[in-house]
Structures are given as structure tokens and as C-alpha cells.
């Protein structure tokens, strides 16, 4: 398999690149996304957080291999797809603590003494953050030979 080091994204359009699932590649993916999206894209920083978390999860929780990241850049929205080309190593799901944290983070009047933080420290805080940044637009498909994650980050004002 070859890995494309180039960048083929116009102002609006789509491009993809494959990364090995190792920690150093998460930083490389962030650099690649920064180069792919215009500096003025208002959703770019949120998109970088989502990519970091999802690819980082492949590194930490997945089997070694590679993952293909596709960036979609359209008017008003950034879309993404990450295909981890290995069988799922566990089930991606939301515990009750995760659901509670999402609700707590989304509520500006929430009690700052959130009770379930200890549970969340064990289950991770990445998925709730992704769900909030994507305003709920996240889909994880666990297939026999790969896991495919689709997401949308709203707020891009590029034309």
C-alpha cells in the first residue's frame, strides 16, 4: 500500500490520505488537515479536535494497521470519514456516564459538581466532546474487517 503525502483539496471539495495507526501519525494528520483547510475556515479548529480524538482512539484502542481519513469541505460544513482498516478490537458505545456528561456539557446551567466524572475518567471523555462539536452528527459503523466513522462539523463559512 502506498501513502499519499500530497494534498489535493481545492477551496471546496474533498481529499483523503492514509495514516499508520501510531501516535506520531496523529500529529501528522493534524498538520495535513491544517494544510488542507483554509486558515479562515471557522470550523477548522473543531475539526482538528475531532480528527485528533478519532485517530488517537485508533492508536490507543485499536489494532495496529492503517486508517484512511477523508475530508469533505462544502459550503457551511466540514464532513469527515475515518476508515480504520482493521477488525474492531472492542465495541464503540456510550455508557450512561457518557450520556450524562454530554447532557451536562450541553447545559449552561449545569451544576459544576458533576457526579459522574470519576466514571468518565475510566470510560474516556473523547466521544462526548466529538458529539458536542459535531452537534450529534456522528455515526460509527463496526464492520467485520474495519470500523468506519462519519461526522459533520457545522459552522464553516467558506464559499
Image (cartoon, grey):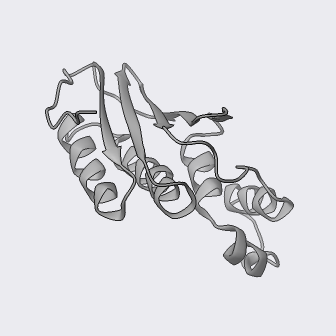
Q: Residue 159 or 102: which is nearer the viewer?
A: 102
Coordinates of residue 72 in the picture (x, y in percent): 38, 25
99 sits left or right of 142 in the view: right
**Residue at point 67%, 33% (across, down):** 144
Q: Position of residue 89 (x, y in %)?
A: 64, 52
> Taking 75 as reference, is 40 left or right?
left
Give the total of numbered labels. 0
Task: Inspect this view and state whether residue 38 appears.
Answer: no
Vertical side of 104 occupied by 29: above or below: above
Is residue 46 shown left or right of residue 137? left
Residue toward you, 114 or 127: 127
Residue 19 vs 138, above or below: the answer is below
Q: Quadrant of the N terminus?
A: top left
Percent coordinates x, y for residue 146 in the rendering: 57, 36
In the drawing, does residue 93 fall left or right of residue 54? right
In the rendered image, the quadrant that contains the C terminus is top left
Residue 114 at x, y = what percent? 77, 76
User: In the image, what residue occupies the spot 16% across and 31% down?
Assistant: 7
Residue 62, image quadrant: bottom right
In the image shown, does 36 or 5 lie closer to the viewer? 5
> Which residue is nearer to you in this view: 159 or 118?
118
Amino acid at each position: 500500500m502506498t501513502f499519499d503525502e500530497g494534498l489535493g483539496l481545492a477551496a471546496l471539495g474533498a481529499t483523503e490520505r492514509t495514516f499508520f495507526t501510531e501516535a506520531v501519525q496523529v500529529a501528522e494528520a493534524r498538520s495535513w488537515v491544517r494544510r488542507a483547510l483554509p486558515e479562515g475556515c471557522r470550523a477548522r479548529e473543531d475539526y482538528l479536535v475531532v480528527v485528533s480524538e478519532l485517530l488517537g482512539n485508533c492508536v490507543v484502542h485499536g489494532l495496529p494497521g492503517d486508517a484512511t481519513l477523508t475530508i469533505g469541505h462544502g459550503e457551511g460544513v466540514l464532513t469527515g470519514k475515518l476508515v480504520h482498516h482493521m477488525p474492531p478490537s472492542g465495541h464503540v458505545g456510550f455508557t450512561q456516564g457518557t450520556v450524562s456528561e454530554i447532557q451536562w456539557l450541553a447545559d449552561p446551567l449545569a451544576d459544576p459538581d458533576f457526579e459522574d466524572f470519576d466514571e468518565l475518567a475510566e470510560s474516556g471523555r473523547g466521544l462526548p466532546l466529538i458529539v458536542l462539536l459535531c452537534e450529534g452528527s456522528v455515526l460509527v459503523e463496526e464492520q467485520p474487517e474495519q470500523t468506519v466513522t462519519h461526522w459533520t462539523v457545522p459552522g464553516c463559512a467558506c464559499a
